[in-house]
Image: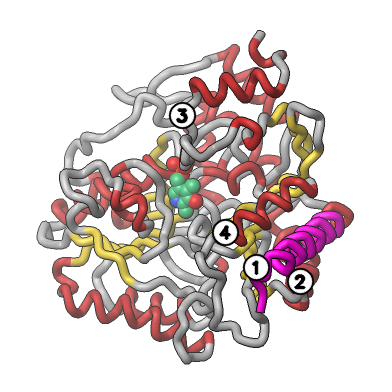
């Protein structure tokens, strides 16, 4: 069987036949290709037997850690009972009904109806269609514009990439012209460290929130359908907004008739120390997009939480022509139920808030003492550290941007820790089950990685 081949043979076949996500295939050398063989808890092993600490929880999703036989068993049992049936045509099944009930308990009180897909991107596609249809239903069809933010990530489908604020993705949008879908507008992100503005973080947070107000007022509230945002921008580089940002955004939205979409694909299910990021920041969304942590990645599942007033409008409006073959897939719902049962039983959300979150954050913050680090930030169990060429002048950046991030990320892998690089920052999002000992080990590996990176840059004359 192919999976028993040598690592070199696997790499060669991978290069020949596997079109990877977000990859420069021309530049990716065979020797750089890593084949992951197995995982348990917070640990991964590659095909050469190297052990790595999974500092990214897979891809921001493995909240309960890898290898939970309880989830495997729940899926196996569901697969042998009913491996698949659809939820179209007046039908349902136990797992989708039970998961919907559980989500109505776990989500904020305005959410009691849930629509399912296979991931975060299609959840956001669903939301675009629901939002625009909602305003048609309530007799305000001119409300079509969705405001998003620069550097947001909402997924890779045509609609989700348009909602996102990644310029490179807009350039490859799939439309007839480069750029997002019509009717999606991007405003500034609350990224103080990246702002180069002479404001305190709190002043900057207000400034960034006012960009929303300004844009709504310029375009006209009567044309704006919704504002979409991640509570903390994840793929954009773990942009934790200044404390002033969300309260001011909430004030702006509360004063206006505009729907708010909280993209909880990363922040949902405990990542920020509450069940949902909107609870951490006390906002009141009309929609939530959920995926990733909902199953801890054991099987693909996305869900859209629809608030009562929106659900009520659809209730009175006839058929909504929308659905996926795998909406509410029974095995995926069973995986979600087992995952959420573990999260509740082991009180993982409380653990992030009261125990491992503060423990990790305290040690993460100390990394700011390192010569290479200009800022550290962390909320719950998601964080970033910004590397800079000269600590005495934080306005300076490495040129070109991104090389040092990649260098550090590669050192991190070599040292046995998976972190991700965004620009010249390193980002972290480990499983919520991380123990104190594992956190200590993680921090030690980050330090080694920073040292290795610093030495290399020193040698190359790229500091100061
Ligand atoms: C990952 C992600 C998505 C896209 O989810 P997929 O399951 O990859 O389609 C959407 N929004 C956010 C915030 C994400 O991090």
Q: Are marks 3 and 4 in contact (CB under 8 Å)?
A: no
Q: Quadrant of residue 356?
A: bottom right
Judged by depth in the image, the label closer to the viewer, 1 or 3, is: 3
Marking on residue 367? 2
Magenta stretch, main secondary structure, is: helix
Q: Earlier in the sequence, mark 1 or mark 4?
A: 1
Q: Which of the image's four quarters has the N terminus?
A: top right
Please give the residue where the numbered disc 1 appears in the rendered image.
Answer: 385
Disc 2 secondary structure class: helix
Is residue 302 visible from the viewing direction of this image?
no
Whole-Å distance between the Cαs marked 1 and 3? 31 Å
Query: How far across and down, in percent of the image, does residue 107 sit?
Result: 51, 54
Residue appearing at x 66%, y 64% in the figure? 380
Q: Which residue is mark 3?
A: 19
Which region of the structure is painted magenta? 439-464
**Nearest to the observer: residue 425 or residue 322:** 425
Label 1–label 2 contact, CB within 8 A: yes
Q: Is the distance from the Cβ of mark 3 to the nearest ligand 1 atom less than 8 Å? A: no
Disc 1, SS = strand
Give the answer, above or below, for where 171 lies relative to 274: above
Given contact means CB atoms under 8 Å apart, are the residues at marks 1 and 3 in contact? Answer: no
């Amino acid at each position: 069987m192919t999976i028993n081949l040598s690592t070199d043979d696997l790499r060669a076949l991978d290069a020949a036949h596997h079109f990877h996500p977000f990859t420069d295939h021309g530049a990716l050398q065979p020797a750089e290709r890593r084949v992951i063989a197995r995982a348990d808890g917070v640990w991964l092993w590659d095909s050469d037997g190297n052990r790595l600490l999974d500092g990214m929880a897979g891809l921001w999703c493995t909240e309960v850690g890898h290898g939970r036989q309880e989830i495997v068993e729940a899926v196996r049992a569901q697969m042998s009972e009913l491996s698949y049936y659809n939820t179209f045509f007046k039908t349902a099944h136990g797992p989708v009904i039970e998961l919907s009930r559980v989500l109505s308990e776990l989500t904020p009180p305005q959410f009691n109806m849930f629509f399912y897909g296979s991931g975060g991107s299609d959840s956001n596609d669903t939301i675009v269609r629901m939002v625009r249809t909602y305003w048609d239903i309530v007799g305000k069809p001119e409300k079509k514009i969705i405001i998003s933010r620069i550097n947001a990530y909402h997924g890779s489908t045509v609609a989700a990439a348009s909602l996102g604020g990644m310029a490179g993705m807009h350039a490859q949008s799939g439309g007839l012209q480069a750029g997002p879908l019509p009717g999606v507008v991007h405003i500034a992100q609350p990224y103080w460290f990246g702002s180069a503005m002479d404001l305190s973080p709190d002043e900057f947070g207000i400034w960034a929130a006012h960009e929303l107000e300004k844009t709504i007022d310029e375009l006209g509230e009567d044309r704006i359908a919704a504002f979409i945002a991640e509570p903390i921008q994840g793929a954009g580089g773990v942009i934790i907004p200044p404390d002033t940002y969300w309260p001011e955004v909430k004030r702006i939205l509360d004063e206006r008739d505009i729907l708010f979409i909280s993209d909880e694909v990363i922040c949902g299910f405990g990542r920020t120390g509450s069940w949902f990021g909107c609870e951490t920041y006390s906002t009141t969304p009309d929609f939530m997009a959920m995926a990733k942590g909902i199953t801890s990645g054991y099987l693909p599942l996305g869900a859209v939480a629809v608030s009562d007033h929106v659900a009520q409008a659809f209730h009175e409006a006839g058929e909504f022509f929308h659905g996926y073959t795998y909406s509410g897939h029974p095995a995926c719902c069973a995986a979600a139920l087992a995952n959420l049962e573990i999260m509740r039983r082991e009180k993982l959300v409380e653990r992030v808030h009261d125990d491992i979150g503060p423990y990790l954050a305290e040690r993460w913050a100390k990394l700011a003492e390192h010569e290479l680090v200009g800022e550290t930030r962390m909320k719950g169990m998601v964080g970033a550290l910004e590397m800079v060429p000269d600590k005495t002048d934080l306005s300076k950046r490495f040129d070109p941007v991104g090389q040092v991030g990649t260098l550090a990320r590669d050192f991190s892998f070599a040292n046995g820790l998976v972190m991700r690089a965004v620009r010249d920052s390193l980002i972290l999002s480990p499983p919520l089950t991380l123990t104190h000992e594992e956190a200590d080990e993680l921090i030690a590996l980050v330090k080694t990685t920073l040292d290795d990176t610093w030495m290399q840059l020193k040698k190359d004359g790229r500091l100061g």
